[in-house]
Amino acid sequence: FGLLGRNRPLVRFVLVFAAVQICISAILVQITKISLGRARPLPALEGNGWSPFSLKGKFHSFPSGHTSEISGAAFPLANRYRRARLSLFLGLVVALIGFTRIYLCMHYISDVAGGLAAGVLAGLLTHHLCSREQP
């Protein structure tokens, strides 16, 4: 709708959002996962401790990419539209995703917290870059 209706603030928001998500969630989180090489908690994966610069998925626990991506998407949307129900719904989705990552033994609590921090960073950056205009 932004391109068809020539809604420049919406187009800017979407482009900034996509660029920030790519930079933070795709690049920064993946570089951190590979560089640190923390083993996942799932015993079936047989990962022990740390294996820095490993390309094996069993050593890509920290930070949680799922949590980073969902919180990086939810924060700017909740902040942009400022609707209580939308914010509550998005917050519940973020919490549910974080919980399932721990429940499925794919991440430790600290991994989810690290992913949340990366996502909030992405959200703050998106908000800062788009704060001059209103929807």
Image (cartoon, grey):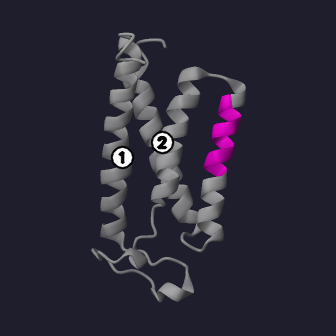
Which quadrant holds residue 133? Answer: top left
Query: What is the CA distance from the residue labelled 2 to the residue labelled 1?
Result: 9 Å
Q: Nearer the viewer, residue 37 or 134?
A: 134
Q: Which residue is mark 2?
A: 72
Point out the image quarter for the N terminus: top left
> Vertically, is 122 above or below 79?
below
Q: Are marks 2 and 1 in contact (CB under 8 Å)?
A: yes
Disc count in the image?
Answer: 2
Which badge, 2 or 1, comes first in the chain's sequence? 1
Towards the viewer: 115 or 12: 12
Q: Tag 1's secondary structure?
A: helix
Q: Is residue 91 left or right of residue 5?
A: right
Residue 71 placement, left or right of 35: right
| Magenta span | 86-95
Q: Amino acid at mark 1?
A: Ile
Seen in the image, is 55 located left or right of residue 125? left
Q: Which residue is mark 1?
A: 24
Q: Residues within 10 Å of mark 1 (few under 14, many from 20)?
A: many
In the rendered structure, does residue 89 fall within the stretch colored magenta?
yes
